[in-house]
Structure formats: structure tokens, C-alpha cells
Image (spheres, rainbow, N blue to C red):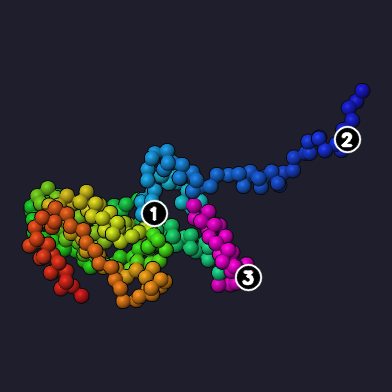
Amino acid sequence: MKAHVTDNPSNKAPAVTAPVEKNLLDAQEAVSDRIRKRLATSKTRFFANDNIADFIEPGELEALEAEIAERFEAVLRSLVIDIDNDHNTQGTARRVAKMYLNEVFAGRYGSPPAVTEFPNISSLNELLIVGPVTIRSACSHHFCPIMGRLWIGLMPNQHSNLIGLSKYARLAEWVMTRPQIQEEAVTQLADQLVERVRPDGLAIVMEADHFCMQWRGVRDSGSKMLNSVMRGAFLKDPALRREFLALINMKP
């Protein structure tokens, strides 16, 4: 006897192409989750001011930009902004995503700048000062701008590697273009320079305006933050430290 198919709800409905495709898209793993899993598997820290470029595969930065744009669009909607009809905020989510990944926080997602190192053939061992170097960063507490400048003092030795003047600024930019707090940012830059130059001494002084104080909170537009890191000879020799500080105070 031939079987008869009824409208019984227990019978499986035929597959519908469009909804299935949509469900598959919805089920896809977010690129941020893939990157996060690699970091967790390797037991690598990924704090706001860490660089994670080694864990991003080709093409994923573009996918990450699209994901951030989509999620920031949801933030704008939660702020009750009519991004569908407001001509000023149409495209804002995409612009913010691009800005964060490629500019403001580029030092978090990009590889370190190429720095050519030269041997110290002349055995230079006198105080070298670079600065002021303009700094642009963002506070990791509120994502408000940090704008300032820094000075770098070096005491090279015969085993030091010498790097081009512009490379100090490039390294500083790479470290600072991440969500930062100033105290940790200066220490990170000091670690980079000690590793590359291997000097007898290193000193960094940074002065910056923090818009998380000027734009919100106490709204004090006159306050600046000034901090320093001293390594090696600068830490042990008070006369050298005084010479460095005196010379940078002569700068405009």
C-alpha cells in the first residue's frame, strides 16, 4: 500500500534556502572571538595596551573593522540616535571602527616599525637627547585623548646599537597609539629602547594633557601629568640625571 503524506506537524518541513543561509551566517564565529581564542591558547596577555599583531591573520583586520562598525552602530542606537535618518551620523560607526583600528589604536594591531640599527663604531658615550616628541594616545579608562610630548635621554656605550632620529618618534608612536595610562606607556617605551639600543643609561620624561580630566569629571583644563622613567646610569648617577633634566627644561 502506498504511503500517504499528511499535514501532520510531526512531519519535517522542506528546507527553505533563505532562512537557512541567514542562520548559517548568524552562527559564524566572530573574528574577535577567533583572535581571542588564539591569545588564550598561547596564554598571551591581551590587555588594552598590549600589542596583538602576531595573532591576527591576513584579512582579519578588515573583518574586525566590519565587526566593530556593526557593534558600534548598536551603541549609537542605544544612545537613541536616529542613524537611519540623521545625515550627520550615517556612516559614523564605520568611520569610528576605521579610526580605532588604523589610527588611534594602530599600535595595538600593527607590527612594530622597522628600525635600522647601526653599530657604535665611534664608541660614542656622551649624553644624547631626543625631543620633544609629540605624543597622541587615549586613556584606557574613558577612551579620551592624551596629548603631550616626551624627551628621551641615552648614554650609549661601545656595544650600543644606534638608531635613526626619526625611529625614536616611530617607536614612541607605536607604543602610545593604544589605550594607555601614562605611567605604563612610558615604561613600555623604555623597555623597547633598552632592548634595541642597549645603552648604559636611559631616561624618558613625558608631559601630557589628559582629556578625561578636561572634558569630564573635574573639568580642570590647566592640569598636566608629568612622569619619568630612569634606567641604568640615569638612576645611579644624580649628576647625570640633573644634567638631563636641566637640558630638557631649556626646550620650549
Q: Is residue 76 visible?
A: yes
Residue at (35% x, 66% y) in the render: 146
Q: Is residue 170 visible?
A: no
* Tag 3 residue: 85
Residue 192 relative to residue 154: left or right: right
* Tag 2 residue: 6
Badge nearest the viewer, 3 or 1: 1
Q: Any magenta on residue 82?
A: yes
Which quadrant would the N terminus be assigned to in this image? Answer: top right
Residue 222 location, quadrant:
bottom left
Nearer-N-terminus badge (1/2):
2
Nearest the viewer among 233 and 88 is: 233
* Number of numbered labels in the structure image: 3
Q: Secondary structure at mark 1?
A: loop
Residue span colored magenta: 64-88
Which label belongs to residue 142? none
Does the magenta stretch mainly form a helix, a strand or a loop? Answer: helix
* Tag 1 residue: 48
